Amino acid sequence: MAFAALSVLIFSGWFVVTRFTVTHQLRIWDVTALRFGVGAVLLAPILFKQRLPAAAWLEGLLYSVLWGAPFVLLVAMGLKLTTAAQASSIVPALMPVMAGLLSWHASKRRPAGSTIWSYGAILLGLVALVISRPMSSGAIDPLGYGALVLAAMTWAVYSVRFRTSRLSALQSAALICFWSALIFIPVYVGGNLSRLSQASSQEIVFQLVYQGVLMSGVALFAYNRAVAVLGAGAAAAMMALVPVLATLLAVPVLGEVPSLLGVAAITVIALGVMIAAWRPLPVAIIETAK
């Protein structure tokens, strides 16, 4: 629960920070390059001090597709075309529902009734929270919302797959950063996509720390540890608390004040999250957690 809470705090701030960034000096490409470029450098010792088998590198490549650069690009696109509150509502709140359905399909075991009801509460709160937010351009942008739904889907697939992975939390985070940087940075440099020269040194340093250190290192590790201990469903459900904190952070940073319907929706989502995540953990799972 502590690892899940840490990842929730960092992710919540990331939606607000990224929304602010992509609507000012920097672009989506800069955010992605800073996040995985710095992360790859910081976590490189984990990969090269250990002799990982070829299968682990291939598994890391798959994880980088599911929760690496493509995921960040999809969320950043959604943030640019919608709002921080909408994006932070759709992706983390929709992801646990998708993860639960995937686990149900894979195991052929029907979830408990309380879990199903909690997913329903999360969906209901999600719809209400999105409706409660004013549209940035006065109209719904299908591309922005489609990108956010696809991001939630890839995150859910990653959460389910990592639960049975033999990689540790740090190895997974390091491989995601390595493959994302290896594939994206050459495109970023060769395509002349950088706008770093137009940003202040303070902005660049802040983004280096938040995107590269906190998101690529601390948050990835904390989330992977939460998945290993709690399981994909419960850890994913915890991430549905992100809209709560992101909406609160958006008030002073972005000037987005939630309506009464938005507050009610946040309450419903929080209740759904607590029901989905609150369950006893088998001792064997805790002892063998990565």
Image (tube, rainbow, N blue to C red):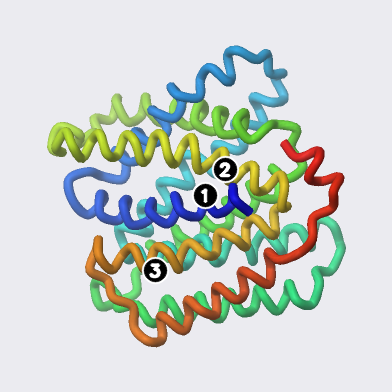
The amino acid sitting under disc 2 is: Ala
Q: Position of residue 262 (x, y in %)?
A: 40, 80
Q: Residue at x 61, y 79 (%)?
A: 121
Q: Which mark is residue 222?
A: 2
Q: Position of residue 57 (x, y in %)?
A: 64, 24
Q: How many marks?
A: 3
Q: Which mark is residue 7?
A: 1
Residue occupied by mark 3: 86
**Label pair 2/1, CB-CB below 8 angstroms:** yes
150 displayed left or right of 97: left
The amino acid sitting under disc 3 is: Gln
Q: Secondary structure at mark 2?
A: helix
Q: Which mark is residue 243?
A: none
CA neighbours of label 3 inside 10 A, class few (<14), some (14 to 19), many (20+): many
Q: Position of residue 266 (x, y in %)?
A: 47, 76
Q: Residue at x 52, y 64 (%)?
A: 241
Q: Earlier in the sequence, mark 2 or mark 1?
A: 1
Q: CA distance from mark 2 to mark 1?
A: 6 Å
222 displayed left or right of 13: right
Q: CA distance from mark 2 to mark 3?
A: 24 Å
Q: Residue at x 84, y 52 (%)?
A: 282
